[in-house]
Amino acid sequence: MNLADKINKQLPAELVNFLVTAGGMAQTCGDGLYLVGGVVRDLLLGRQNLDLDLVVEGDTKSLAEGLASFLSGKLIAHPRFGTAKLKWDGWSVDIATARTETYARPGALPSVKAGTLQSDLFRRDFTINAMAIELNAPRYGELIDRYGGLADLDGRLVRILHERSFVDDATRMWRAVRYEQRLGFKVEPRTLELLKQGIGMLDTISGDRIRHELERVLQEDFPEKALRRAAELGILAKTHPSLKGDKWLAERFARTREFTAPEAPSIALYVALLAYRLTPEEVERLLCYLRFPNTVTFILEDVANIKTELEILVERNLPPSGIYALLDDYRPTALQAVMLATDVPLARERIEEFLHKLRHVKPALTGADLAKMGISGGHIKETLNSLRNARLDGTIRSKEEEVRWVEENS
Ligand code: ATP
């Protein structure tokens, strides 16, 4: 099957020209050059994907350097891994030497050595991701499908390439549910059986690698679908037994997307909702295992603290200055997470009021104005706080009233 037409139709002209040029150059240098992985799958499915991954059988370094010089582009090479990123005119492609991988023990990172296209495709996760397109000039556009990827695309199946796949690398379980739910496919029955049998292999995977896969899930359009399936198969519980991928979560995720639209929610916001129903001790354990960056860690800690303030937050006569005092120390993302998660309407309303209105309230007088009025340095902050609280509660409404208040109270 030749996919040159699909390439022309689905990729922008700049990338099509690049592929043709790269194929011609590879042919001249005596290297084999292939387009591989997700983009091949998506070309066949008619889905937009501009992440081009190229594999070279031959001298990756000189081919990548030749292309960089031809395009006046920039090459970021990682010679140790035989990979390079080529960037030009706002475009970017990944180029890697064909490689073979072997696993010293389950869950370990693989040992890698140069290999053939066939071995490079065989190390991949699923048949639908293990197809390639030849780019060398004479056979430009020809599909290479050694493992039945095309049939599985037709049958809408996510299938591993060999029986030991999940034992070698259990992160593929997360990847399986991600592709299944993104594409509306099904995990193929034997693959599903092996996944269930091998669920314990997730214990061999480092928290860093699980976090990476979880972040990929949370970048999907509807992460709750993969989380629901991961929960159903016992994959999610292996990250933490108290995590749930249920209706509650699906509703909160949908609400969150409405709230952040047109932007997608941040990973931190989704993680805060996913971890919302955990106890502080459980959150601590999750954070220790997954080692999120500090930004996420601080947000999860804030959420745990805000939850302890909720009872006071919904007290009947709490004035705006009281809401401000309770919530001002917390990061906005943490407040958003609680606002989107809580079932208590008054808590939601008050956090929303704080985020949209109260936190922006400031007195008209500045520290410099107060200093000119003779307020000593040690009292300026306190005076500004009192003025802001009076503004929040509506007891002061103008700059003149602020000046009068300062004169009367200093
Ligand atoms: P997409 O999510 O659209 O597939 P992608 O193609 O960029 O994006 P990556 O996660 O970057 O996906 O992986 C690139 C390719 O590397 C995949 O198509 C897959 O074949 C392979 N791959 C990635 N992770 C693994 C893994 N754990 N085991 C085997 N192959 C993998």
Image (cartoon, helix red, strand yellow):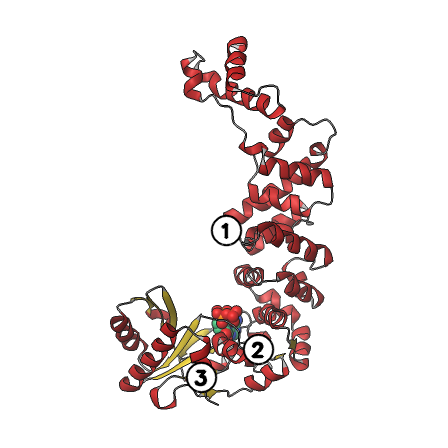
Instruction: Give the residue pinned by disc 1.
Output: 293
Label 2 element class? helix
Rendered view: 250 above or below 145: above
Identify the residue under disc 2: 165
Of the residues shown, which amino acid type is indicated by label 2? Ser
> Would you identify the image quadrant in which residue 186 lies?
bottom right
What residue is drawn where x is 55% and y is 64%?
A: 213
Q: Which residue is mark 3?
A: 5
| Residue 286 visible | no
Q: Nearer the observer, disc 3 or disc 2?
A: 3
Counting other residues with Cα less than 10 Å from the Cα at mark 3, is it few (<14), some (14-19), or many (20 or more)?
few
Mark 1, other Cα within 10 Å: few <14 / some 14–19 / many ≥20:
few
Residue type, numbered disc 1: Pro
Instruction: Find out if the beta carbon at label 2 lies less than 8 Å from the nearest ligand 1 atom.
Output: yes
Q: State which mark lies toward you, 2 or 1.
A: 1
Distance from disc 3 to disc 2, alpha carbons, whole Å, reads 34 Å
312 vs 248: above or below: above
